[in-house]
Image (cartoon, rainbow, N blue to C red):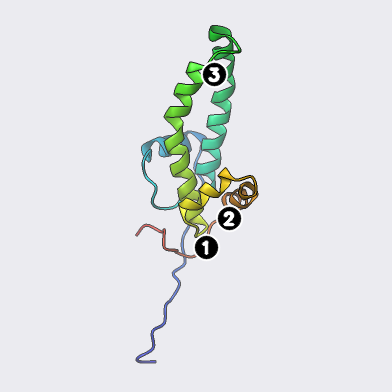
Amino acid sequence: MEGTNQTVDKVYTPQPALSFKEAISTCFKKYFDFSGRARGSEYWYFILFITLISFPIAILDAVFFGSDSIAPIGLIFSLGTIVPSIAVAARRLHDSGKSGWWQLLSLTVIGIPVVLYWVIRKGDDRENEYTQK
């Protein structure tokens, strides 16, 4: 088989699932890291963290600033978590072999189910262009 140009897919060994605390820590450590892959536990635990923290923050904003206020505590929390949320979503899409830019599709109503499918599905079993060596 000399002279042939065969590519061999390398089997990707997925990392074990992260705990809730590890996932939150990883997402904040990789605050501006849009490269590599994120396992499902990392992504979904971070989404759970943001959801769980948002409820008490909304209550605090309503108690201290009124219901028709700008909600400054929520705004600060949102600003502090928007970048790591986008970064972990990009890495999660990379796990499915998709570019992180595809999450922009979720800005359209039609694109939400498509992006949701990609982040829900199991990641690639093979190395892909986003696998960090």
Front tag of 2 and 3: 3
The quarter of the picture where the N terminus appears is bottom left
Instruction: From the viewer's perspective, tell me whether residue 39 is left or right of residue 109.
Output: left
Q: Residue at x 48, y 17 (%)?
A: 72
Total numbered circles: 3
Q: Which of the 4 image quadrants contains residue 69?
A: top right
Percent of width and height locating residue 82: 46, 34
Q: Callout 2, which amino acid?
A: Lys
Q: Assign a secondary structure to mark 1.
A: loop
Q: Which mark is residue 57?
A: 3
Q: Callout 1, which amino acid?
A: Asp
Percent of width and height locating residue 10: 44, 69
Is the C-beta separation of discs 2 and 3 under 8 Å?
no
Q: Which mark is residue 96?
A: none
Q: Assign a secondary structure to mark 2.
A: loop
Q: Assign a secondary structure to mark 3.
A: helix
Q: Which class describes the residues within 10 Å of circle 3: few (<14), some (14-19), or many (20+)? A: some
Percent of width and height locating residue 55: 59, 22
Q: Callout 3, which amino acid?
A: Ile
Q: Which mark is residue 125?
A: 1
Q: Residue at x 57, y 18 (%)?
A: 58
Between the residue at mark 1 and the residue at mark 2, the CA separation in whole angstroms equals 9 Å
- Dot 2 or dot 3: first in sequence order is 3
Vertical position of residue 120 compared to residue 62: above or below: below
Q: Residue at x 48, y 27 (%)?
A: 78
Vertical position of residue 41 compared to residue 62: above or below: below
For mark 2, what is the residue?
122
Q: Residue at x 42, y 37 (%)?
A: 83
Q: Which class describes the residues within 10 Å of circle 2: few (<14), some (14-19), or many (20+)? A: few
Q: Which class describes the residues within 10 Å of circle 1: few (<14), some (14-19), or many (20+)? A: some
- Dot 1 or dot 3: first in sequence order is 3
